Image (tube, rainbow, N blue to C red):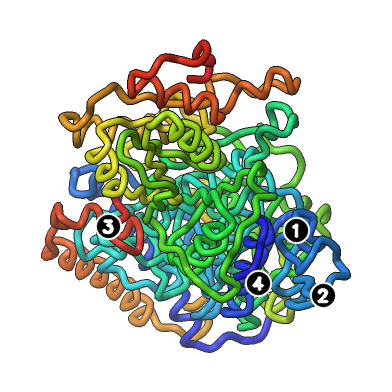
Amino acid sequence: MAELARDTLREMQLRMLRIRAFDERASKMVKRGHIPGTVHTSIGQEAQVVGATMALGAGDYMSGNHRSHGHPIGKGSPLGPLMAELVGKATGVCKGKGGSLHLADFAVGSLGESGIVGSSIPIANGAALSSKVLNNGKVALAFFGDGAANQGVLYESMNMAGVWDLPMIFLCENNQYALSTPAHTVTSGIISERAAGFGMPGIRVEEGQDVLAVYDAVSKAVARARAGDGPTLVEVMTYRYNEHSEGLRLGTDYRNAEERDAWLKKDPIMLFRHYLASHGFSDDELDGLQATALAEVDAAVAFSDASPYPDLSVAFDDLYTDKESAA
Amino acid sequence: MTVMSYLGAIGAAQREAMDADERVIIIGEDVEANVYGTTGGGKSRSDKGDFLQRYGKNRIRNTPISEEGIVGAAAGAAMTGLRPIVDLSYSSFLYMAMDQFVNQVAKNRYMFGGQASMPVVFRSAMFYGLNTGAHHSDRPYPMFMNVPGLKIIAPATPSDAKGLLRSAVDSDDPILSFEACLLWSAKEDVDENEFWVPLGVARTARVGTDVTVVAISSSVPEAVAAAEELAKEGVSVEVIDPRTLVPLDRDAILRSVAKTGRLVVAEPAHRTCGAAAEISALVAEEIFDSLKAPIIRVTAPDMQIPFSPSLEKQMYPTKVTIAAAIRRVVDLPALQPVAAAV
């Protein structure tokens, strides 16, 4: 891999810290009732998210899933409107209509997270089709989990992307559990190896807590897509620290303490801090990044707190392009 | 004006739309070979005007048989700058893509606070009345009327097929077009120049004063034929074709029924929760005091469609069953026992 610019390395750590700080705050806010409903955090999966999103260009597209905050943050979306959306405020990135499960920020190419497992995969595929037809050089990436890897629409989409040579990256975030179900108990074979059946490269990133390893793998897939050579399936091995969703209390201990401890020792933010410290970043600078992320989250919460809830009158806006068609 | 068939009019609209805007593409199963006759100048690939030759493989794309993947990809393409027309061939195939229609196509604009535009048209043919059995004979538009965020058209004439499709392609909202195969060969004079029939505006197919028949899709010509029969007995029947089911032209329906005081609603879909049920409820809620007789629905029964021609033919509204319903609301004696479908 080519040597990355210092600013890029710095930005990687900052974005991972943003996701960690944002989701830790969101978790607390759910438990206090400050955020209605629930949220699904990306805590523990920051390297996988940021390695992928930073391998994309600013104009590139992505779609995501229910573990939804990291993707737009990783793509560069400002935190204030994201936090306001989680709370249901009028200033939310989706005007309070979507909530945590349906974050979207078209300004950064985020075409939407999805509460239906696997459902947003063909959306990114369609964005890749647009890029191909319009010949605009953009690529598209679909985030999905190990659970979605068993949805039929993934394979319809991989086939279509393969046969049309779409500039597409299928990014499987394998955190090894579909809610409480261990992936290996419901998944036959290795997910990345399924790519071979569609004539496309399949890459498994075993060190998915290493942001540079993810960045490297996804960058290769992006380069292939941008060159017109077609799609790639990238499977990233990772781990979520929190429960499937905040507030969920499962009766059985489906993940044992040894497993969790082993993953905590490979914490992506800690790992990358060590890397940066050995590559010319001072402790002060690294502490400063953490302070910056926390301050940005404080500001995002303050922005949300100061924002109004949507007026009842807007409930019927944006169903259609014209308000008259809504009942 | 030139004589066009219903299918020919759809082909003309698709060609005009492809010529007018390079962002328009056509994707679907077998569109390259012009199997259904809407992607070519004529019936064969070699005919002048063939879409594949004219527009190339970048804009005319055969798809794999993967409805969920097709519909989702069309949605994603629409959200990022294209204006796809998706040919899903049979309407029964829409079920394969239900998640994408309901959870992505219909919801994305709203869920994302208006960020997403969804300029995409999903065309499908309702193959009923042709002895193709239960899997190919559905008329599923009422299911989709129950999904806010979709707009639905059901043109009944060649002119409306052409003009509504142009409006559909130009719309930034997702449109489902339900086209009855029984109408494919219908012919009439159609303006060969570009024209647009606005969405949400009903057409008065026949003016009358005693009874309003609101008829949908292939029930429109049946209703007009019934009206002509009843005219011989001095009953003046107005036939309203909503053309667009979402948004529905409520005002046109209410205006007509307020004038006539009697309503029959005819459609080829199932009875329960159909468009006829919705239109009946609308009239009963809004202008009950104008009604001089109970509303009657003439629909398909809540049955699957049998294969045998002798069984299938009684399933859909005909001029006979519609005329029988009209006779009931104007207190004329029945000519024959009222058919099961009424």
Amino acid identity at mark 3: Glu
Same chain shared by disc 1 and disc 2: yes
Query: Which of the labelled discs sits on residue B15, or is there none?
Result: 4
- The subunit letter for the residue under badge 4 reads B
Please, what secondary structure does the residue beneath circle 1 have?
Answer: loop
* Residue that mark 3 sits on: A324
Quickly name the residue at label 2. Answer: B48
Neighbours of disc 2 within 10 Å: few (<14), some (14-19), many (20+) = few
Image depth: mark 4 or mark 3 in front: 4
Residue situated in front as seen by the camera: B284 or B169: B284
- What element does badge 4 sit on? helix
Horizontally, is A2 left or right of A303 in the view?
right
Whether residue A49 is visible to the viewer of this picture, yes or no, is no
**Image quadrant where residue B29 sits:** bottom right
Q: Nearer the viewer, mark 2 or mark 3?
A: 2
The percent coordinates of residue B100 (x first, y second) are 54, 48
As drawn, the label of residue B37 is 1
Query: Are circles 1 and 2 on residues that touch, CB within 8 Å?
Result: no
Q: Residue at x 12, y 61 (%)?
A: A308
The reply to whether residue B338 is in sight is yes
Task: State the separation of the CA atoms marked 1 and 4.
Answer: 12 Å
Q: Mark 1 or mark 4, which has the lower sequence index?
A: 4
Asked if marks 4 and 3 fall on the same chain, the answer is no
Residue B200's spot in the image, x, y percent?
37, 55
Residue drawn at (70%, 51%), measured in percent from left and top? Answer: A156
